[in-house]
Image (cartoon, rainbow, N blue to C red):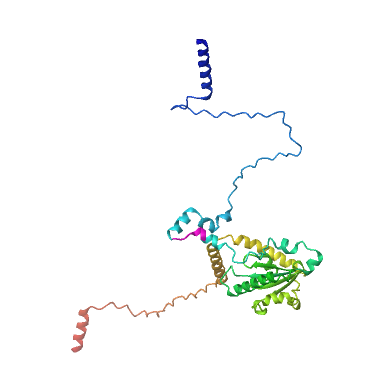
Amino acid sequence: MKFSWHACLLAASAVRGQYFSEGWKPGQQRAAPTAVPIQVDSTFESSGDAEFVAPKQPATEGTPDLLGLLDVNTYLTSEPAQALFQRFGVNITERIAAAQVSPWDDRIPLITDDNYEDMIVNEPLSDEEAADRVWAICITAATGRQDGLSKFVDEAFDDAYNRTLLADDMPNVRWGRIDYFNVTYLTTKWVVWQAPYVLILKDRGQSLRFYRPQNLRLRDAALRDFLLADGWQVTTPWNTAYAPGGEREYIMEFFATWMTKIYNLVIRIPKFILLIVSGTVASFLIGFMHKKSPQAKKPAVKAPTTTPAVATVPAASSTSAVASPASPGSSKSSKRKGKK
């Protein structure tokens, strides 16, 4: 019985040594964590359908974009800037978010340089549907400045769109909007240098008709009636050499491509830097253009050298002698002799 008690105590101490440690003591080095081997069941057989998916590696941070460092929003949304504006009672984060909200109806798609080809040119349609498709597009400049005319055209355009949805009588007409200040390639290719415009587009972008607000009645659902009666067919589409399909269209495409590249570069530079650079360049050009031309140096004219005239004294006679200066006493004696 005593032997069995001793055996139980020895077994308990061994088990306690496996699961409990003495812990860390001051001055003792930390032990490196031991790697636990993973046991793989050799009897497991993967099915043919299963595929090995490599774990995603964490994205390595590359070199920062230099143009991204010039973005003003990056500095305005930083913690020091937020704390500074918060002292004046301004929530700069909400102001920036509100400025980025679109002011237009989200139901009307926004046409850009990136989605124009997929949305209009390569729209999946049959031949009959493509021949019947009409795009009504509003080119507006309401985001760039407080333009009352652009706002009026946007309201008339939205009203015609809402009335068409309720009537559901023009299934072949689609609606779109172009932001003039954020679309560069299309407006440059179409030679649109101002806004607003109402554009009637057909034949996958090959037939374009532009209407200024002064030349088209828009009030009281007049734009909807214009589309419903196909009034745009009276107007001749743009058919010059630079129009889509013209013999010089490639010139406008080349010009629009490079204008877009320049715009995408310049738009990321803060306006105050552009103001400084443009002012410096303008001052240099004005100074260069108004610079006086250097005048040719005229040869210096030497003054004629005159020799001083020497006065010739006639030769004295041999009998004359040079008189020495007379003393005062001699002059007095001569006067006395004359009186006698």
Horizontally, residue 78 falls left or right of residue 136, namely left
So how many labels did they put on this image? Answer: 0
Which residue is found at the position 21% from the left and 80% from the top? 330
Q: Is residue 194 visible?
A: no
Residue 90 magenta-drawn? Answer: yes
Q: Give the image location of residue 51, x and y in percent.
A: 73, 39
- Could you say which is closer to the camera, residue 24 or residue 244? 24
Q: Determine whether 178 is above or below 78 in the image.
A: below
- Could you say which is closer to the camera, residue 159 or residue 112? 159
Highlighted range, magenta: 89-94
Horizontally, residue 209 falls left or right of residue 286, namely right
Residue 258 magenta-drawn? Answer: no
Q: Is residue 289 visible?
A: yes
Q: Give the image location of residue 57, x and y in percent.
A: 63, 42
Q: Determine whether 220 is above or below 9 in the image.
A: below
> Which image quarter holds the C terminus?
bottom left
Q: Give the image location of residue 229, x and y in percent.
A: 74, 77
Which residue is found at the position 54% from the left and 60% from the top? 97
Q: Quadrant of residue 163?
A: bottom right
